[in-house]
Image (cartoon, rainbow, N blue to C red):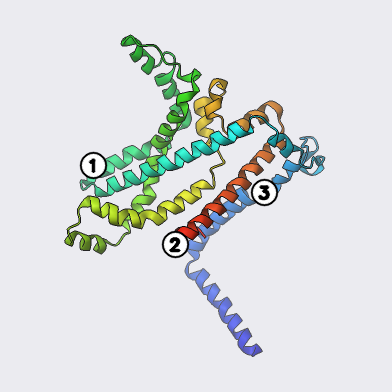
């Protein structure tokens, strides 16, 4: 019995070694990603202890005095917490919903295009905005929507009153959503196009023989088969629903307090708090709050998805 167990164990170790050697290139590539995640995602978690301390740069993390839950009490008693949390979640929901719809629509459109030259050109055009810096976008936006921008010049030309976009917060959520779609929807089509390309063509051929047109093929075959991918990507996006796009929002809004009521998110608020007060303990407490709530939302969303459609759940 013991000899059999030892023999099986040796065989198992040998099998693992053979597997590692056989796919050594793939495991080497994977190890780089694992090391990256360990260094930049797991090691920084040790810094969460700062959220429970009255941090001092002179004393460092270890010697700074404990503050208990004072940083969290200050966070939850802050009058701006509800507004920045609502803005963060609401904007991210709009980004996810309209971004997903646009990406899926573009993917379906590109798959149906038969002219290869036009198809590649169109794909390149919609993907290029992904690589444009938000700082560059902010300059162009100022040129369009500023007090002396192109839009107001056109309005003045037709005898209409100027619109002070940078003093009126009501339109900025729409502007942010449109810019986010413009910047990210094209890049988001890549996964959907790859998924659609991998579908069995025989299913489509059989449907065509039965008399299905292109619209019916999309509605009855492509979208149902694409559902799992859409749900999985949406669940992954929900994990960041409590994290505002700092690069985008700060580049476009900056320190314009006149439109904070509709655009200020948790990340930009924390940045200003850290810049003005250097309160690293408070900033870490906010980050901890974001991560934990986001994690719980992912768990709940995945649980709900598993109850409705187990095949679409992440785990």
The circle drawn on residue 289 is none
Expressed as whole percent of the image width and height from the top left, the position of residue 233 reads 45, 50
- The crowding category of the residue bearing disc 2, from other C-alpha atoms within 10 Å (few below 14, some 14 to 19, many at least 20), is some
Q: Is residue 45 left or right of residue 209?
A: right
Q: Which badge, 3 or 1, is on the more N-terminal residue?
A: 3
Q: Residue furthest top?
A: 159
Residue mark closest to the camera, 3 vs 2: 2
Expressed as whole percent of the image width and height from the top left, the position of residue 72 reads 72, 39
Residue 108 in the image: above or below residue 129? below
Expressed as whole percent of the image width and height from the top left, the position of residue 29 reads 50, 58
- The crowding category of the residue bearing disc 3, from other C-alpha atoms within 10 Å (few below 14, some 14 to 19, many at least 20), is few
Residue identifier under label 3:
45
Residue identifier under label 1:
118
- The crowding category of the residue bearing disc 1, from other C-alpha atoms within 10 Å (few below 14, some 14 to 19, many at least 20), is few
Q: Which badge, 1 or 2, is on the more N-terminal residue?
A: 1
Are dots 3 and 1 in contact, CB under 8 Å?
no
Residue 156 in the image: above or below residue 62? above
- Secondary structure beneath disc 2? helix
Expressed as whole percent of the image width and height from the top left, the position of residue 7 reads 60, 85
Mark 3 to mark 2 CA distance (whole Å): 32 Å
Q: Quadrant of residue 144?
A: top left
**Residue at left 32%, top 37%?**
125
Residue 47 in the image: above or below residue 280? below
Q: Which badge, 3 or 2, is on the more N-terminal residue?
A: 3
Q: Is residue 313 visible?
A: no
Residue identifier under label 2:
311
**Residue at left 63%, top 47%?**
292
Mark 1 to mark 2 CA distance (whole Å): 36 Å
């Amino acid at each position: 019995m013991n000899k059999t167990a030892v023999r099986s164990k040796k065989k198992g170790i040998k099998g693992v070694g053979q597997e590692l050697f056989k796919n050594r290139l793939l495991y080497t590539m994977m190890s780089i990603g694992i090391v990256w995640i360990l260094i930049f995602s797991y090691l920084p978690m040790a810094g969460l202890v700062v959220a429970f301390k009255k941090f001092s740069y002179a004393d460092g993390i270890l010697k700074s005095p404990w503050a208990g839950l004072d940083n969290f009490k200050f966070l939850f008693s802050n009058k701006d917490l509800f507004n920045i949390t609502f803005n963060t979640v609401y904007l991210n929901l709009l980004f996810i919903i309209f971004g997903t719809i646009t990406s899926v629509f573009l993917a379906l459109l590109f798959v149906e295009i038969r002219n290869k030259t036009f198809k590649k050109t169109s794909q390149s055009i919609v993907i290029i905005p992904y690589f444009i810096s938000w700082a560059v976008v902010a300059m162009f936006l100022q040129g369009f929507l500023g007090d002396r921008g192109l839009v107001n010049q056109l309005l003045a030309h037709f005898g209409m009153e100027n619109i002070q976009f940078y003093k009126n917060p009501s339109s900025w959520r729409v502007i942010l959503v449109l810019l986010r779609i413009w910047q990210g929807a094209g890049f988001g089509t890549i996964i959907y196009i790859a998924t659609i390309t991998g579908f069995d063509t025989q299913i489509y051929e059989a449907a065509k023989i039965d008399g299905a047109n292109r619209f019916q093929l999309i509605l009855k075959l492509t979208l149902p088969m694409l559902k799992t991918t859409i749900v999985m990507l949406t669940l992954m996006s929900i994990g960041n629903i409590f994290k505002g796009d700092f690069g985008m929002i700060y580049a476009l809004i900056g320190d314009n307090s006149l439109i904070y009521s509709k655009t200020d998110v948790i990340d930009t608020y924390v940045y200003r708090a850290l810049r003005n007060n250097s309160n690293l303990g408070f900033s870490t407490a906010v980050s901890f709050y974001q991560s934990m709530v986001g994690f719980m939302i992912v768990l709940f969303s995945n649980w709900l998805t598993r109850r409705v459609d187990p095949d679409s759940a992440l785990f």
